Image (spheres, rainbow, N blue to C red):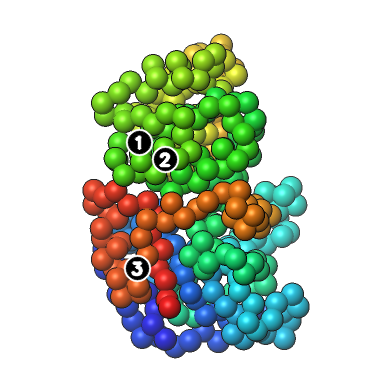
Amino acid sequence: MKAIVLKNAHELVVEEAPEPQIGPDEALVKVAACGICGTDLHLYKHGSLSPNVRMGHESAGTIVEVGKQIEGFRIGDRVAILGRIPCGQCHWCRRGRHHICPTRLDVRGGFSEYVAAKEGMLARIPDNLTFKQAAVVEAMAVSLHGVRLAQIGKGDGVVVTGAGPIGLFAAALLRDIGVRKLVISEPSNRRRETASRWADRVVNPVEEDLAEIAREALDPCVDALVECSGQPRVLEDAFNIVGFAGRVLLLAACLENINVNPALLLVREIRFETSYGCDMEEFRHCIELVRSGRVDVDPIISRAVSQAELPEAFERLCGPNDDVKIVMDIP
Ligand SMILES: [Zn+2]
Ligand SMILES: [Zn+2]
């Protein structure tokens, strides 16, 4: 089969590899689609400590073989794969925080033609979901996890900064929840246009004053800000934009230090929430939101590429671009 292997930073190759041999507790999935994720891009840009990493963790496809211990799935089932499996035993797993289990098993190889997955990673997908839609559910569940942690709900006035996949999934979910008003800030014209289907007001932060517009549009209060741009200055500003009892939710990786005066947070009782990953319940919930039509993910998938086109797609995403979510599909 063909696999997508990271040799070094910026060196991704399509390579002939043996099909995975499944263990008794695994199923073999013939991959039909797999999303490119921010984590994949990070690996691609900086390289990995272990050589020859098989890339991809947001895959969906059809089960073609099952191990003896697999009970809930059969050959022919259409599934989405959540690329990590928690240990189920540790301090955090026992408290229901499975997604941050330090001894979890991360599974990659979703851009390959076949991938082996344990039962706990599999979620069945309904017939009306395409594989491409199923392949973006993980990213959507990451946004859902954050929105839940920050307790953003009905009636809140919310700002989303950054309209990449995570920001747009957050926007779509916030609309479904029934937030009062939504302002989305994004410099790319194309991404802003996509965002406008969920936003009451889109803002180009290069030309407009986000703080002023947000305060006016969300009067009497900016209740929450969801930071998805990864820009340190945007995160600093976030603490000034939210109002009394406001929440700042960090969903993007910001790699630099920021400068924030804690007293300004204290007197307004601002809460800072960070969110990393998602769990199987959230993953399944997102599948249901797409199935029922409550959340339309199609506008967030900006392009489909073949396996052979993946190296070029990765390189393109590293430079200036106006793509949103790119999904590989294998016909
Ligand atoms: Zn991902
Ligand atoms: Zn654990």
Distance from disc 1 to disc 2, alpha carbons, whole Å, reads: 8 Å
* Residue shown at the point (62%, 63%) measured from the top left: 85
* Residue shown at the point (50%, 30%) measured from the top left: 182
The residue that mark 2 highlights is 195
Q: Are marks 3 and 1 in contact (CB under 8 Å)?
A: no
* Residue 179, position as x, y percentages in the image: 59, 31
* Residue shown at the point (51%, 61%) measured from the top left: 133
Find residue 194 and report its image quarter. top left
Distance from disc 3 to disc 1, alpha carbons, whole Å, reads: 25 Å
Q: Observer-nearest residue: 101 or 248?
A: 248
The tag earlier along the polypeptide, 3 or 1, is 1
* Residue shown at the point (44%, 25%) measured from the top left: 238
* Residue 168, position as x, y percentages in the image: 46, 44
Residue 291 visible to an observer of this rendering: yes
In the displayed structure, 274 sits above or below 96; it is above
Q: Is label 2 in a helix, a strand or a loop?
A: helix
Q: Report the amino acid beneath label 2.
A: Ala
Picture disc at residue 186: 1
Closer to the observer: label 1 or label 2? 2
Q: Observer-nearest residue: 315 or 88?
A: 315
Distance from disc 3 to disc 2, alpha carbons, whole Å, reads: 23 Å
Q: Report the amino acid beneath label 3.
A: Val
Graded by Cα atoms within 10 Å as few (under 14), some (14 to 19) or many (20 or more), the crowding at tag 3 reads some
Q: Is residue 199 left or right of residue 83?
A: left
The tag earlier along the polypeptide, 1 or 2, is 1
Is the distance from the Cβ of mark 1 to the nearest ligand 1 atom less than 8 Å?
A: no
Q: Are marks 1 and 2 in contact (CB under 8 Å)?
A: yes
Which quadrant holds the C terminus?
Answer: bottom left
Picture disc at residue 305: 3
Q: Is label 1 in a helix, a strand or a loop?
A: loop
